[in-house]
Image: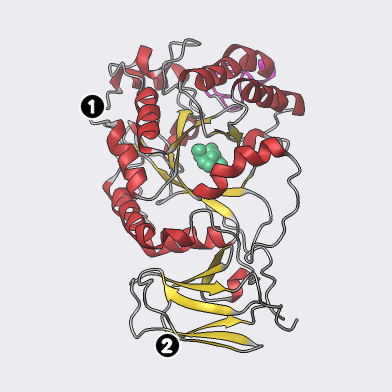
Amino acid sequence: MAANISSVAGGTQEPPRDEARERRLAWFREAKFGMFVHWGLYAIPAGIWKGKEVPGLGEWIMFRARIPVKEYAQLAKQFNPTRFNANEWVQIARSAGMRYFVITAKHHDGFAMYDSRVTDYDIVDATPFGRDPMKELAEACRREGLRFCFYYSHVQDWHHPDAVGNDWDYDPAKKDFNRYMREKALPQVRELLTQYGPLGLIWFDTPRNITLEQAEAFRALVRSLQPDCLINGRIGHGLGDYREMGDNRIPEDVVEEDWEVPATINNTWGYKVTDHNWKPVERLLFNLVDIVSKGGNYLLNVGPTAEGVIPEPSVERLLAMGRWLSVNGEAIYGAGRSPFRPVSKFPWRCTTKPGRLYFTLFQWSETLEIPALQHRVVRASLLADPDRTLSVKQSPDSVVVTLPPHPPDPIASVVVVEIDSAASPPAKD
Ligand code: FHN
């Protein structure tokens, strides 16, 4: 059966159900690749507490070691990231080809990494550093053309007596979650949406047992302050603008919704000195293309150190991805889903634009074989060598493109197949 490529061919689309949501999502659908940053007090212990390695994620150390609030809060006095340079971080994201930047304004430990008037438990009031890195990052992102976005842990807050998570300092039976929302979470979300210019999105996390009414209060606040700011799926109760997949969980096949995969380069999100399990760049590039071919966005994390440095193994990999994207980005940014399904049946990954199919090949051979197409192929070439036309044989059963003897890229090379989307009648079904 010939692949249904009506959307590729520029065919008619369903009218949008919600104009405002469609408008909000336009940049996200184009962007495809973003930087996630987990940075907080947890970068100081970096996974080690009182001389012992604490198992699990670096940013969960307070919870995993049941560190009392008073003790954990002492870390703030040591937090002095003198090597932090907002421009360098944003340059790394930009050179990686990332189009948006999402950073932890407050993670589950409850410490605000920005200047908050709601509490003194924040980077400006409680640390020797005394600067607001979020202001600097927001400005750098704006200068470099990246969408600036905040992560905010809206349900878990291990510092606040009424929030979810801390049952070693606070009696769960005495918690009043609405009080936490009123006194801390909602006022802080208001600050984030009013002090840093327009945000691309706000990234809520671990909704746990938040009620519909409570989740609606977060949504209403965001909408009232910045109607164009996207809300991710983890706000709870399906109130987000797009779906958030599980951490590092890439779906098996195409998903016909707007979605994103938050993912790590090593195992942990926040910096952990013992975590050296860096994924190879081959895997990261495959994940990016695989995700885009299935209709999603890749939000790839870095965990800077307490000095304010993004670990070198992350930087190396991100820059390699950026070099690849500078040649092959046409197959990624703004590209649509693969019409060839299930996606995993094929050794390559296909992404699409009107009149164009992009085949990213991870293994090289003499030919690229594609199942039957409904439209006539008018030309094939490599994104890395656009002036050289590749020979194509199209039959009712298949399309075969003859490849040059060597791949232009040792990891992944993209063949672009142009189709006559306007004129040709569909091939046999
Ligand atoms: O508990 C967090 C975790 O620390 C990290 O922030 C990730 C990122 O997606 N979200 C939660 C677990 O899913």
Magenta highlight on residue 173: yes
Q: How many marks?
A: 2
For residue 177, which quarter of the picture?
Answer: top right
Circle nearer the N terminus (2, 1): 1
Q: Are marks 2 and 1 in contact (CB under 8 Å)?
A: no
Residue at 58% over, 31% down = 229
Residue 188 appears anywhere in the view: yes
SS label for mark 1: loop
Residue 244 lies in magenta, yes or no? no
* Residue toward you, 425 or 317: 425
In whole angstroms, how far apart are the C-alphas of marks 2 and 1? 53 Å
Q: Amino acid at mark 1?
A: Thr
Quadrant (top left, top right, bottom left, bottom right) of the N terminus? bottom right
Image coordinates of residue 103 in percent, x first then y, are: 44, 34
Residue 402, labelled with which disc? none
Compared with 64, 369 (above or below) is: below
Label for residue 366?
Answer: 2
Left or right: 158 with respect to 342? left
Magenta range? 158-176
Q: Residue furthest left?
A: 83
Residue ID at (32%, 58%): 323
Q: Which residue is mark 1?
A: 82
